[in-house]
Amino acid sequence: MFANILKKTVIAASLVLAAGSAMAQNIKIGSVLSVSGPAAFLGDPELKTLQMYVEKINAEGGVLGRKLELVHYDDGSDAAKANGFTKRLIESDKVDVLIGGTTTGATMAMAPLVDKAGLPFISLAGAVVIIDPVKKWVFKTPHTDRMAAEKVFEDMKKRGISKVGLLSETSGFGASGRKESQAVASKYGITLVADETYGPKDTDVTAQLTRIKNTAGVQAVFVFGLGQGPAVVTKNYGQLGMTALPMYQSHGVASDEYLKLSGKAAEGVRLPTPALLIGQMLPASDPQKAIVVGYDKAYKDRYKIDPSTFGGYALDALNLSVDAIKRAGGTDKEKVRNALETTKGFVSTTGVFNMSATDHMGLDLSAFRMVEVKNGDWQLSK
């Protein structure tokens, strides 16, 4: 009898230990980012940001008494590799949430896998196709390319510009941006009088720019791309002496790296950006000021370089994930997904998120600020 009691006690103790062990398991944040390759200047600050803030959250006690564990892979700016790494994160690493897809191509390669697995996924890429139509398990933090086009055309309309030469990248982001620009231009009285493209690895686009320059009636150039390509375009634009023709870029270049790569040719370039790029210029009453200034300082202190809006997208994705896990009371994937979808009034570096069953991004045009390059730096547009 004593042996039976002892056996039951041991079993009960084992169950308690097992339950305690399960409770203490790390919360796994999976990530696939383009830390190398053409999109590296987007993916590198994203990874640096996730690493820094996972450490910070853990130092402050973790989430629901559990530590965060970042499991990350570099897809080398290759969508096929992004697909493979996502499969590994789901099947082998068994992550609780997935953050990543630096580019639209990578994100779209990852999306079918997370949908099949039922894994909450927050993309860091820009194209509207990521969340339109709505995909049950897919969310995103950056503004869409459609919003960027609308913000740019809104500014052009104010300035009396109606005839525009469009130059877009053949990447997923650029191709989607071209499509969305074509779709919304007429809404703002804009006619696209020229429509040129370039490859993300092209080292010269003077031929395309020359054709735009020689197009009758053209009043401005709108470039839609990301990574190093838009900087090549900007330098060629300067070399061709096109500075009298206003240049607009998308939010795909909203980082100081673009200024460094473009040099003096970027002077006067205008684009829509999240608040992070001009955090110190925001009024004290702006609800985003504290978070963007805090992130700016933390990143500079840690890495001795300026942060970028792309790192901000990663911070927002991490914070949204943590907030959803807290509200879900754990890492049950369906509950976390539901919590993400009901996010309201969540202030971030990118804007104030208000998600719903029909909107898995939750930002509007007010989350964009128009900036202009003046004296080699960003200035709020008037």
Image: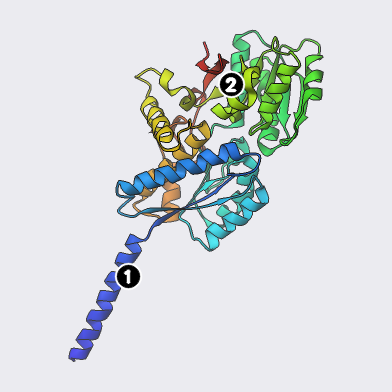
Decide: is 102 above or below 254: below
Quarter of the figure with the N terminus: bottom left
Q: Is residue 216 left or right of residue 371?
A: right
Q: Position of residue 81 (x, y in %)?
A: 64, 52
Q: Position of residue 375 (x, y in %)?
A: 55, 14
* Residue type pointed to by label 2: Leu
Neighbour tally class for label 1: few under 14, some 14-19, many 20 plus, Cα within 10 Å: few
The answer to whether residue 366 shows anywhere in this view is: yes
Q: Pick whichever, 125 or 357, lies toward us.
A: 125
The answer to whether residue 132 shows anywhere in this view is: no
Decide: is 348 above or below 92: above
Q: Is residue 379 left or right of residue 127?
A: left
Which residue bears the numbered disc 1? Answer: 18
Judged from this view, the residue extending furthest toward the front is 304
SS for dot 2? strand
Q: Quadrant of residue 135?
A: top right
Decide: is 59 above or below 289: below
Q: Pick whichever, 132 or 57, lies toward us.
A: 57
Q: Is residue 238 left or right of residue 349?
A: right
